[in-house]
Image (cartoon, rainbow, N blue to C red):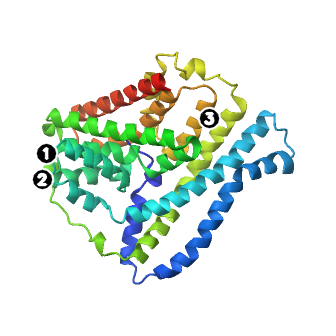
Amino acid sequence: MAQQDPVENTALAAAVVVAQNSPAPTLKLGRYVLLGLPLLALWVGVYWILEPLSKWITFDLAAMASDSRLGMAIQFFVFEAPKVLLLLTLVVFGVGILRTFFTPERTRRILAGKRESAGNVLAALLGIVTPFCSCSAVPLFIGFVTAGVPLGVTFSFLVSAPMVNEVALVMLFGLFGWKVAGLYAGTGVAIAIISGWIIGRLKMERHVEPWVYATPVGQGADEESMSWALRVEAGVAAVKDIVGKVWPYVLAGIAVGAGIHGYVPENFMASIMGKDAWWAVPVAVVIGVPMYSNAAGIIPVVQALLEKGAALGTVLAFMMAVIGLSLPEVIILRKVLKLRLIGVFVGIVAAGILIVGYLFNIIF
């Protein structure tokens, strides 16, 4: 249920705080617009020429054979690395602005007192646009529960927030297109809604550590008072924070993907992770749960596995297990949850991921 702490969305919340505490905006909104328009035009131009530029650099400038394994691997890396970083920069900036309207405090207020079912849906949707990382799982859980948010609704949020985040969605869109990104987002939200609803039906409040309910409810800052200039500054700060921290994982993941792309034979993965291997989906989930990674590092690997014959459902199940469930966050949540509730939570989410994996393998 988590990504790595340094790479996650808490940076966006920090960016909002920095912008709010700034004595005065360094640039007025009009100046941001005048500066942003040419930068956007430059972004579009660079993105448009990336593929031919990567081929020219690899096969003409570096004089590598286009049919060699090393040449294919290097061209993959030279093309995908700037492509993904450009997409991340643009989307993180936009989401950084959006999240000034949806801080954890405001999300808690929205969900407080909501009934289950409708609350599960709302929590799963809010999880997409609310800053979250594994280090914030405990304070968010405490804040939600003590504010009167039902336990099942809280879990819908805790599943959705790390699994369906802007890094995952933008990289899926950039590498696979809108259809796969949309299917991933839809199934991820569905898993969050259903998992939270089931946990709510099981009435497992007694398996929350007693001290959690005794914690006083804190009050957050009024994020609605921010000007648009400050919101833009929050977006810029989010890019510096998140992209500045995530780029090593992006490059590492793309490097692994490039190696698979260049050196693993075509259809090699079909026998291991293909549709005909009925055991592939559960094995992928079992392998993915204990891994400690994030979307930036795992999605390029997923792309390369697909190119070599792995089934879509299997690799998406693997990806969901890696970034939607993780051993580090389970350990963190042990501070507030008893083992039985943790086991039920992991089991329900893993079962949902299994269903999604098999369903995708049947449909695609």
State the separation of the CA atoms marked 2 and 1.
7 Å
Q: Which residue is found at the position 23% from the left and 46% from the top?
A: 154
Residue 155 visible in this rendered orientation of the protein: yes
Q: Secondary structure at mark 3?
A: helix
In the image, what residue type sits under mark 2?
Ala
Q: Are marks 1 and 3 in contact (CB under 8 Å)?
A: no
Q: Position of residue 177 (x, y in %)?
A: 55, 43
Examine the rendered structure and indicate whether residue 92 appears above or below residue 285. below
Tell me which numbered mark, 2 or 3, is placed earlier along the sequence: 2
Q: How many marks?
A: 3
Label 1 vs 3, first from the N-terminus: 1
Q: Residues within 10 Å of mark 1 (few under 14, many from 20)?
A: few
The residue that mark 3 highlights is: 304
As drawn, 68 above or below 241: above
- Give the residue at mark 2: 214
Q: Residue at x 43, y 51 (%)?
A: 5
The N terminus - image quarter: top left
Does the image show residue 132?
no
Residue at 74% across, 44% down: 75
How far across and down, in percent of the image, does residue 353 sit? 38, 30
- Report the Cα–Cα distance between label 1 and label 3: 46 Å
Q: Secondary structure at mark 2?
A: loop
- Name the residue beneath numbered marker 1: 210
Q: Is 115 left, or right, of 4 in this rendering?
A: left
Q: Residue 146 location in percent, x, y?
A: 16, 53
Q: Are marks 2 and 1 in contact (CB under 8 Å)?
A: yes
